[in-house]
Every structure is written in C-alpha cells, then in structure tokens.
C-alpha cells in the first residue's frame, strides 16, 4: 500500500490546500477512492494526489536554528512609530 | 401500459433495486474509502431511478413516483433478476457492479436523442456519473483479478454472467418503443456489445451454453424479490408519509 497526500483547490484564486491522506495500492485506485472520500460534497474542483514517497522532507535539526531569531520578526513598527512621532506637530 | 413506458420502467426498476442493493454495503464495505465510494454509487443509481419514476409518474394511472417505486404488485415490476439477487459476498457485489454498469452505460446511450424529451434531457448527467462508476468497477476488478482474489472474482463471474446476460431480455413494449424513437437501439444490439466487453476481460464466453433464469420478458420476479421488497418498504410501512 502507498500513502497519498490529498490536495484540493476551489474555483478561483485559492491555493491548493492539504485535505488529508489516503492509502491505496496505486495511482488509479487512489484517484477512484479519493474522489468520494474528499470531494463527494464538491469541496474542490481540482484534486492533486501526491505519493508520500515522492515528497521531499527536511530534517528537523536543519530547521531548528531558525527558531531563535526574533530579529527576523521585525516588522518595522518601532521605526514607523518614531517617524510618526517626529512628524507630529 | 403504453409500450414505451414499459421499457423505461424496466430501466427505472433496475436502477432502483441496484441502488438499494449497493446501499446495503453502507458501513460494512471492506474499507472506509470503498464504503464511501460504493454508497455514492448506490445514491447515483437511486437518483437515476428517481428521475425515471418522476418522468413516468406524469401518467396518473401509474401513480406518483413513490407509488411506482415501492407500491406495485410484484408482477408489475420490470426488474431483471440480476438486481434482485442478494450478494452478501463482496466479490459477488463487486462483480455485479461491474456487469451492471457495463450494461447500464449502453442502455442510457440508447436513450440519448430519445423522442421523449424528459428522458433525453437527463442522459448527459447520468453518463457523467456512469463514467465514474465504470472507472471504479474497472480499477478494482482489474487489480483484484491479478492478485490472490483472482479465483474468487472468477467464481463470481462464472455464477453471475448468465444472470446478468438475461438483463437483455426485452420487455413486451420494446418494438413499439423503438418504432416511436423512445429508445434508439434494440436490446439485442446492446447485448452483443456488452458481451464483447465481458469477453474482453474473461476471455471468450460460450454464450450459447449459458442457462438464463426464466424472467418471461421481465414479468416474473425471482425468489429473492419478496425479501428485498420487504426491506426497501420497511420505512414506508412504519410511516406512509416518509419521503426518500
């Protein structure tokens, strides 16, 4: 059995979103089964199935150093506040 | 009954009872995704029946759609024995699904361009649903046929093909329905195409050697009909105002 990750997209500008996953023996069975499992109430009008074996995954340890960098969350609000204060009469 | 109606009633009764039979797999299909798929297919077949019963129910002599679906005497149904048969084994249920939908597509094709506008108008919608039914049946039968389940499926085919082939036995009104353009191809012609499809997956079947059930132009019900009819009218018997 393979595991397929299921992505749905609604009509319009919404992006594809992960909807869940599904076990199936091959691509065709995944297609046939995902249709009624994930789109039976027209939850989307486009469907992607991705064999989980084809998903490129990244080590947690490779990502962890980026969890401790508050300076990257700077949204410029401190600078904006000072400039606003200087402009004020 | 007007001859053309009899032809449509045969299809409506088949769709109705096939839908009812498939629906009995709710909650007990072999795995969750198949449970959803098979029961969706059941709903589609019931939908096809409902459309046909609505079309036929404009004739007051026949009663409304619910009357037609549930409240006729057994001899007034025109179902084939294939759809009356209980299939509590999944292998049988799957093989019947394949055999039935292969036939159903051809039967609706023969209604495209029907001189009965209300019928011709629904063919497109039905065929879009049938494309899914066939792809579903084909995907499962092809893959299971190659695996350990192959002999079980073959055994189901061996028992069900003669009963399914009898689905093509025409009703009394067929000639008139053809002359009126209500249906555009005789059942014998559709049967030949259907047999070709069966041959393609089973290898050549000795069609002349098959023993068909005695349906008498679909005027007699199988031994299984009373129990099936009792199950599908259970709710109406409790509450005659219930709606499906």
Image (cartoon, coloured by chain):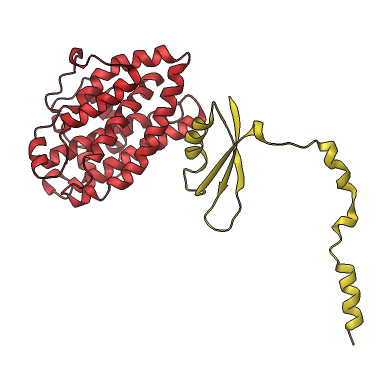
Chain colours: A yellow, B red
The quadrant of the rendering that contains the N terminus of chain B is top left
Question: Does the image show residue B42?
Answer: yes
Residue at point 42%, 32% (across, down): B136
Residue B95: quadrant of the picture: top left
- Tell me: residue B125, above or below residue A33: below
Residue A82's spot in the image, x, y percent? 91, 75
Work out whether residue B78 or residue B129 is closer to the camera in this orientation and state it.
B129
Task: Answer above or below: position of A14 versus B70.
Answer: below
**Relative to the observer, which residue lies in front, B23 or A35?**
A35
Q: Position of residue A5 (x, y in %)?
A: 61, 37
Position above or below: B158 against B83: above
Residue at the (35%, 13%) spot, across then down: B155
The image position of residue A55, as x and y in percent, is: 68, 36
Say if residue B84 shows up in the picture.
no
Q: Which residue sits at x=21%, y=40%? A: B110
Q: Where residue B61 sits: x, y (%)?
A: 11, 45
Count every numbered label the image shows and give the total: 0
Q: Residue at x 25, y 29 (%)?
A: B229
Q: Is residue B6 left or right of residue A36?
A: left
In the image: residue B25, left or right of residue B69: right
Quarter occupied by the C terminus of chain B: top left
């Amino acid at each position: 059995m393979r595991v397929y990750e299921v992505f749905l997209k609604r009509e319009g500008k919404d992006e594809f979103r992960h909807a869940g996953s599904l076990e199936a023996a091959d691509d065709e069975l995944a297609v046939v089964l995902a249709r009624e499992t994930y789109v039976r109430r027209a939850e989307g009008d486009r469907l992607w199935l991705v064999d989980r074996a084809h998903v490129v995954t990244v080590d947690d340890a490779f990502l962890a150093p980026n969890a401790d960098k508050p300076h990257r969350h700077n949204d410029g609000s401190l600078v904006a506040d000072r400039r606003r204060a200087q402009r004020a009469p | 009954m007007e001859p053309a109606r009899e032809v449509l009633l045969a299809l409506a009764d088949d769709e109705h009872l096939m839908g009812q039979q498939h629906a009995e797999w709710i909650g007990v299909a072999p795995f969750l995704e198949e449970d959803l798929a098979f029961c969706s297919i059941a709903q589609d077949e019931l939908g096809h029946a409902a459309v046909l019963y609505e079309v036929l129910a404009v004739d007051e002599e026949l009663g409304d759609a619910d009357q037609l679906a549930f409240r006729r005497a057994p001899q007034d149904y025109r179902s084939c024995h294939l759809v009356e048969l209980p299939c509590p084994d999944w292998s049988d249920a799957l093989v019947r699904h394949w055999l039935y939908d292969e036939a159903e597509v051809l039967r609706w094709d023969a209604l495209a361009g029907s001189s009965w506008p209300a019928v011709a108008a629904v063919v497109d919608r039905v065929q879009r649903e049938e494309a899914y039914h066939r792809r579903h049946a084909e995907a499962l039968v092809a893959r299971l046929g190659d695996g350990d389940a192959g002999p079980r499926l073959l055994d189901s085919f061996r028992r069900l093909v003669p009963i399914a082939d009898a689905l093509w036995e025409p009703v009394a009104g067929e000639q008139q329905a053809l002359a009126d353009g209500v249906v555009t191809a005789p059942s014998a012609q559709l049967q030949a195409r259907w047999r070709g499809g069966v041959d393609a997956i089973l290898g050549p079947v000795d069609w002349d050697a098959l023993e068909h059930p005695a349906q008498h132009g679909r005027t007699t019900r199988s031994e299984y009909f009373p129990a099936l009819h009792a199950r599908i009218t259970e709710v109406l018997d409790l509450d005659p105002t219930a709606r499906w």
